[in-house]
Image: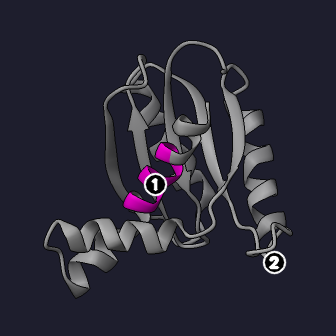
Amino acid sequence: MSSAGGVLAIDYGDKKCGFASTDALRIAREPLGVLRHEGQHEVLLEHLERLLGERNVATLLVGLPLHMDGRPGARAAVVAAFVTRLRARFPALDVQEWDERLTSKEAEARLRALGCKGREIRAERDSWSALVLLDDWLRSH
């Protein structure tokens, strides 16, 4: 397991990103909403700095798009470039990539189980996908 501290998970997209976090003990987990950055990376990084300033985070966890057979998806190179930017901007943090296969489907199922429908699901899906990513990573560690 990486150094002590919380984890901030990111479901990275070209136009919007979903976020979720866990506390320093890695017990409590919460979705942190979605940021529409429209490809403006500085807006995204500034939002991330605000989130980090509000929490004790040791690890940034970024969803890696893989095909069902485990090969990197077409977007994997874009995510790798984003991870490189994160490592340069936040050198004190452990930045890890994690398989995000089926996180959106699981996020939608969880939201439906909570009674959400249509537009509500679309609005929250990315942040809940980050939560699913985080849950999966925590279970594996």
* Residue 36 screen position, x and y as percent: 43, 67
Q: Quadrant of the C terminus?
A: top right
* Residue 32 screen position, x and y as percent: 33, 48
Q: Amino acid at mark 2?
A: Ala
**Residue projecting furthest to the left:** 115
Residue at the image position 26 percent from the left and 68 percent from the top:
111
Q: Which residue is mark 1?
A: 132
Nearer to us of marks 2 and 1 is: 1
Q: Is residue 63 visible?
A: yes
**Residue projecting furthest to the top:** 4
Which secondary structure is most common in the magenta stretch?
Answer: helix
- Which residue is more in the foreground, 49 or 123? 123
Question: How many angstroms separate mark 2 from mark 1 (CA)?
Answer: 21 Å
Residue at the image position 54 percent from the left and 47 percent from the top:
136
Are the residues tagged 2 and 1 within 8 Å (C-beta)?
no
Q: Quadrant of the N terminus?
A: top right
**Which image quarter: residue 115?**
bottom left
- Which residue is more in the foreground, 77 or 22? 22
What stretch of residues is rendered in magenta? 128-135
Question: Which secondary structure, mark 2?
Answer: loop
Q: Which residue is mark 2?
A: 74
User: Of callouts 2 and 1, which one flags the residue occurring earlier in the amino acid sequence?
Assistant: 2
Residue 60 within the magenta-colored segment of the rendering: no
Q: Is residue 46 visible?
A: no
Q: Is residue 68 above or below residue 19?
A: below
